[in-house]
Image (cartoon, rainbow, N blue to C red):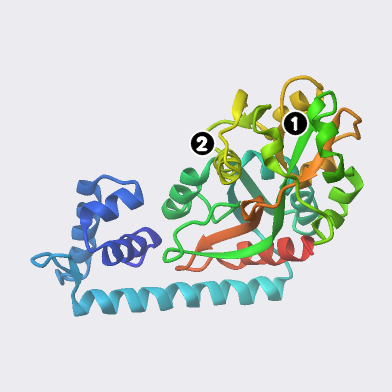
Amino acid sequence: MFSRREYEYVMEIAKEGSFSKAAQRLYVSQPALSGAIKKLEKDLYGILLFDRAVTPVALTPAGQYYLEQARKIYELRNEVEQHFADLAGIRTGIINIGTSGYFCAYLLPDIIRGYYRLNPKCRINVTETDASGMDAGLRSGQFNITIDVEVLDPEMFESVTLGYEYMVMAVPASFEVNDRMKQYQISREAILNRSFLDDSVPAVDLSLVAKEPFLMLKKHHDAYRRSMDICAHSGFEPNVVMSFDQLQTAYNVARSGQTGIIFFRDGLLKYTENTEKLCYYKLGDPLAKRAILLTMKRYPGVGPTVDDFIKYLMLAKK
């Protein structure tokens, strides 16, 4: 009667005003969604939760009452669990995280190891996916939280900023165009300590590389869309000679010294060896800066174990 799934179904139908639209958002079939609501209404002594005779579909007074009370039940359940977990001084349970390949590889491993040392009875599952997979996973309950730079539905989800990433341009040192851009070059150390963000450091004139070959991530990546837009803002469409699934692979190919220019996340340099085969440049486009977002459902809450992990993650990123 007050299962998490039923609560989410009622909430989504109320939000969308349509069983079919809610079914699409929840990634279930419309017959399955309608059947679940009919069963719930039967369990509630036959009282209807929705007025199906109007368009859009609307909650009945009984449906409004159900949502209000179900939300209170979940909040109280989380509060009780948190209280007894605090008394016991332990954390148990499963934390399911959806994120991109980059954060799977570079942001989360050290954080998860540190959290495990403090809470060895917890289990953390990390799934690599794209933005649409994160959205679907949060809606279905597959994920408790996601970590990415994509902004998901603000009505359905709540996001907190973990930090910021900055896109930087790397040009193979063998490219002659570097001679025309010497005044814009920045050092590896300036990227690592982020001193390149100072206003006194000029951004490169991207029109100088308009005719050069580029390496890009594949089209489903946020970095691809950002890179293409940044070039468009400078008045050209890049000549993409190779596309990749992973940023690390693209960076390593660029570092080979002959293939093409790449836009990459500044944090990647923490995990790569120093090289003289690349020259680095600051990008001045606003799209070069993106917030790293931790996203979760607004209702019901994530529970004490996930909440504890989020607090640990926020402290670890400071």
Q: Which residue is mark 1?
A: 251
Percent coordinates x, y for residue 124 in the rendering: 65, 49
Identity of the residue furthest to the left in this view: 53
What residue appears at the point 78 percent right and 42 percent down from the top-left corner? 268
Q: Earlier in the sequence, mark 1 or mark 2?
A: 2
Percent coordinates x, y for residue 194 in the rendering: 84, 55
Q: Which residue is mark 2?
A: 220
Q: Secondary structure at mark 2?
A: loop
Q: Is residue 46 above or below residue 238?
A: below
Q: CA distance from mark 1 to mark 2?
A: 18 Å
Task: Using the image as rendered, state which of residue 30 and residue 83 is in the foreground.
Answer: 30
Q: Are the residues tagged 1 and 2 within 8 Å (C-beta)?
A: no
What residue appears at the point 61 percent right and 59 percent down from the top-left corner? 294
Mark 1 Cα shell of 10 Å, populated few (<14), some (14-19), many (≥20):
many
Q: Is residue 230 left or right of residue 31?
A: right
Viewport quadrant of the C terminus = bottom right
Percent coordinates x, y for residue 69 in the rendering: 35, 78
Q: Secondary structure at mark 1?
A: helix
Amino acid carrying label 2: it is His
Q: Is residue 295 above or below residue 279?
A: below
Percent coordinates x, y for residue 312 in the rendering: 73, 64
Task: Using the image as rendered, state which of residue 48 and residue 244 is in the foreground.
Answer: 244
Viewport quadrant of the N terminus = bottom left
Answer yes or no: is residue 109 visible.
no
Amino acid carrying label 1: it is Tyr
